[in-house]
Amino acid sequence: MAKKVKKRINLALQGGGAHGAFTWGVLDRLLEEPELEIAAISGTSAGALNGAALKAGLIRGGAQQARDNLEWLWGQIGAVKDLRMPAWMGLAAPDPRMISGALEWSLPYMMADSFTRMVSPYVWGPFYRNPLDPIVSRFHYEDVCEAGGPALFICATNVRDGKVRVFSGEGINKDVVMASACLPTLFQAVKLRDPRSGEIEPFWDGGYTGNPALFPLFDKLLPADLVIININPIIREKLPVTPPEIQNRINEISFNSSLLRELRAINFVQRLIASGSVSDGTMKNVLVHMIADDELMNSLSVATKNIAIPAVLTTLKAAGRAAAEGFLNDHWDDLNVRQTADLREMFD
């Protein structure tokens, strides 16, 4: 078997709550490739958690440590020590589609969902605590912020002006990670020093303005290849008609809008370059690739985003690994050579 040629890529990690376990699976498989170098990572919400765990692991102990970090992270999110199930248990576990349907129509979930729409997270006063705090506080930020290794960019939304902010290097800390994953109906805004104004400002989830932000990955020193791990379906054929379906599709459209806007801009630049309208080297010709499992994600809902169920996390990780395996088998030779995502079809 011929030795693989070394490839360099940038990663764009979407947010999507507990569905970020799909990204865990993708990363777990990518980290098994010794000839694959991750040059930069942009992450939002769950993508920010995955990105921080990935970067810290690569700095501290290489690919295996990064895999261990990700497994620890999702073990914490799932409130179990080990999400790896024996094969026979996996066969006995309920299908995640059934879990999703049962959960979103369950009385406790509907009551909790209604409660968050009527009650502000600020009513708890001194009793409030962000549930992510105990997890992200244990990240090794000296490794997350290390100048070496892949560059890491984390996105959050400035509440005051509604614009994206990108944090990197020593500007990343536990509050930045929590801000990137701060859904305003569930969590109080996280106050941070704004990298643009230098003032202390409130921040919400980065998914509203950059899910994730792609523009930090356009730096001329980074590779052209941008691999987006997509966990929010862009296409959903079935018309949403029930209240949960409508809320879920609103969530998906909202959190895909910023990504689609940047992809449209990339497609526009690619057309300018192809037509010779701009001189060579004036603009970076970004090569976009996507790893996704829209069939699985179409069968799940916002309920399984909001509630981390170990059986669903395990299925998502396995699906992520399978999607990454398929991508590597089909497109390894395309990396650093040609784009595999069809942006023309997406926007024509």
Image: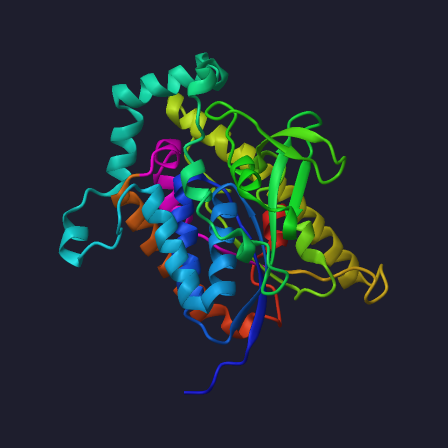
Membership of 290 in magenta stretch: yes
Total marks placed:
0
Give the side of residue 263 with respect to residue 274, left or right. Answer: left
Q: Position of residue 323 (x, y in %)?
A: 40, 59
Side (left or right) of 31 relative to 95: right
Q: Nearest the camera: 269 or 112?
A: 112
Q: Position of residue 292 (x, y in %)?
A: 45, 52
* Image position of 186 (left or right of 144): left
Near-viewer residue (104 or 49) = 49
Residue 225 in which image quadrant: bottom right
Q: Position of residue 216 (x, y in %)?
A: 68, 52
**Residue 287 visible in rendering:** yes
Observer able to see residue 348: no
Q: Decide which of 296, 150 is in the foreground and name it.
A: 150
- Image quadrant for the N terminus? bottom left
Does the segment drawn in magenta span residue 162? no
Instruction: Tell me the residue at 59%/34% (across/down).
Output: 208
Picture layout, residue 278 above or below residue 118: below
In the image, residue 171 lies at what x, y percent?
Answer: 65, 46
Rendering quarter of residue 224: bottom right
Above/below status of 2 relative to 95: below
Decide: is 154 above or below 301.
below
| Viewer-side residue, 334 vs 132 | 132
Q: Quadrant of residue 107 in the image?
A: top left
- Colour scheme in the image? rainbow
> On the rendered structure, is 272 left or right of 345?
right
Q: Residue at x 58, y 37 (%)?
A: 206
What's drawn in magenta, residue-wise? 288-308
